[in-house]
């Protein structure tokens, strides 16, 4: 029926969000990923051999089950604590080398995207790529993932009948070829090294290889998907988190005091200390609430449902706008305020929040499988930087701009004062 699948329903009310997820079923359908699936089943089938998590129905479920346990168990991310700490040391050295005469650092966004990429490479390819030092493959990966998002947001609006003839589609295919080839090159090197020295022992990659077999395409497709889904998101979230802390000095000081109390002025973040760093976790939860990087989640409804009092037929495109919900006064007092205390149970600002009012990583079977890695990456950023520096921000407030995903609406400088 022409036009039917283009019916669009936007929801922001938690009752409707609850209904949408309740009707998700075991294989939630995301029409927006069709484009990715089409490329991996079409021109790049020989490379990918599977659309990975861009598939739908049982094909998606099968892939998801192959990665679910190894990605979602808490220990998987915690295993990388030391690696992330070392990557952050490189990031700090780089930021310091770019401090100007006012002790300010500009354009941190790219550096934190490099941090996100280096972290993904370490975790899912088993390799230190040297992205922060701007090596050639690292630069290519950053530029390609950024371009990927721009092309993706253009191409999902192009009618299917002309899609494959557009130059943007051809470039999009090329982007996916480049991502695959670079990941494959470095993963093969890591596997080679592992055969000699067992260097992958205990890693997510080793687990994925054990579960799916050494010839399986699951680890490599998951590495590309993690790159596509986990670099811009974490990179933007990290620079916005630092902006939030810089522009709320009282909260920043409270965080610093917690860090010093738990780990001392130069101690490391460990699995044990992380359990005590409650204000740190609250700062991250609050920054993700105030600025949800992935502001929308979409579903093609698989059964009729009632949303906002309207009967919504099966096959409609339902879009949850998280950025509206998380700033709605029906769910949060002073929603525009950065108030980490609202997530600390003993605090007087704590109010029990409707669980569906703040879902930065989605919900249900299709929720973000990288959330534990993303959270740990952000925790490491805030821990390392606030332990060493007092951040300052003295210009006009920035806003979040949503083009594909959320990012700061302009470059901004932060003052880094050594403590
Ligand atoms: C701050 C950082 C991140 C945010 C805010 C975020 C958020 C999200 C959200 C909202 C979804 C959609 C969930 C749904 O449809 O219900 C998603 C999906 C996904 N994310 Fe993340 N994510 C982040 C980082 C990461 C990282 C680091 C990785 C990889 C390690 C990752 C991998 C994925 C993948 C593969 C999917 C698709 C899952 C599927 O369709 O089965 N994300 N993410």
Image: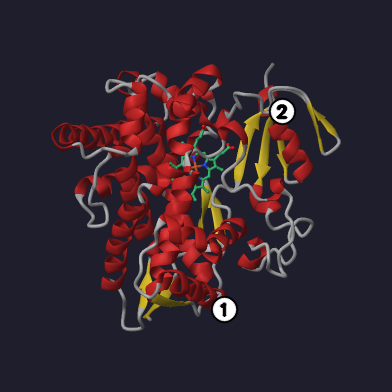
Label 2 SS: loop
Residue 29 relative to residue 410: left or right: right
The correct choice, above or below, for 62 with respect to 128 in the image is above
Mark 2: few, some, or many residues within 10 Å (few <14, many ≥20)? some
The correct choice, above or below, for 150 with respect to 418 in the image is above
Q: Earlier in the sequence, mark 1 or mark 2?
A: 2
Residue 16 relative to residue 56: left or right: right
Question: Which numbered circle lies on residue 23?
Answer: 2
The correct choice, above or below, for 246 with respect to 155 in the image is below
Residue under label 1: 250
Callouts 1 and 2 close, C-beta under 8 Å: no
Residue 162 relative to residue 81: left or right: right
Which quarter of the figure has residue 200? top left
Q: List the single residue furthest toward the front.
A: 272
* Residue located at (18% from left, 35% from top): 189
Between the residue at mark 1 and the residue at mark 2, the CA separation in whole angstroms equals: 43 Å
* Residue located at (31% from left, 21% from top): 213
- Residue 49 x/y as whole percent: 35, 19
């Amino acid at each position: 029926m022409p036009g039917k699948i283009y019916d669009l329903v936007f929801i922001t009310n938690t009752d409707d969000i609850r209904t949408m997820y309740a009707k998700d079923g075991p294989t939630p359908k995301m029409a927006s990923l069709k484009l990715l699936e089409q490329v991996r089943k079409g021109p790049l089938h020989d490379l990918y051999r599977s659309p990975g998590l861009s598939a739908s129905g049982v094909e998606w479920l099968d892939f998801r089950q192959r990665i679910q346990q190894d990605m979602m168990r808490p220990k998987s991310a915690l295993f990388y604590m030391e690696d992330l700490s070392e990557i952050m040391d490189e990031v700090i050295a780089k930021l310091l080398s770019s401090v100007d005469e006012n002790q300010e650092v500009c354009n941190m966004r790219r550096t934190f995207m490099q941090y996100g990429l280096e972290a993904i490479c370490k975790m899912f390819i088993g390799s230190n790529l040297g992205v922060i030092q701007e090596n050639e493959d690292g630069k290519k990966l950053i530029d390609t993932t950024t371009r990927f998002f721009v092309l993706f947001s253009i191409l999902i609006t192009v009618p299917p009948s002309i899609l494959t003839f557009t130059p943007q589609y051809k470039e999009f295919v090329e982007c996916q070829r480049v991502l695959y080839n670079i990941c494959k090159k470095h993963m093969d090197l890591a596997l080679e090294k592992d055969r000699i020295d067992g260097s992958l022992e205990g890693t997510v990659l080793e687990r994925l290889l054990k579960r799916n077999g050494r010839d399986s395409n699951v680890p490599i497709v998951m590495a590309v998907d993690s790159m596509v889904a986990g670099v811009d998101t974490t990179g933007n979230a990290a620079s916005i988190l630092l902006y939030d802390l810089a522009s709320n000095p009282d909260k920043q000081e409270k965080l610093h005091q917690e860090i010093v109390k738990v780990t001392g002025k130069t101690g490391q973040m460990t699995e044990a200390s992380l359990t005590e760093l409650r204000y740190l976790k609250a700062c991250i939860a609050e920054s993700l609430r105030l600025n949800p990087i992935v502001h929308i989640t979409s579903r093609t409804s698989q059964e009729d449902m009632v949303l906002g009092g309207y009967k919504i037929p099966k096959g409609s495109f339902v879009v949850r706008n998280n950025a509206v919900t998380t700033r709605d006064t029906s769910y949060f007092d002073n929603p525009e305020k950065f108030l980490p205390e609202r997530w600390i149970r003993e605090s007087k600002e704590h109010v029990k929040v409707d669980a569906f009012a703040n879902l930065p990583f989605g919900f249900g079977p299709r929720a973000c499988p990288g959330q534990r890695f993303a959270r740990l990456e952000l925790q490491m950023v805030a821990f390392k930087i606030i332990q060493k520096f007092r951040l300052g921000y003295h210009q006009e407030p920035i806003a979040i701009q949503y083009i594909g995903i959320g990012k700061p609406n302009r470059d901004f400088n932060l003052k880094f004062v050594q403590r």
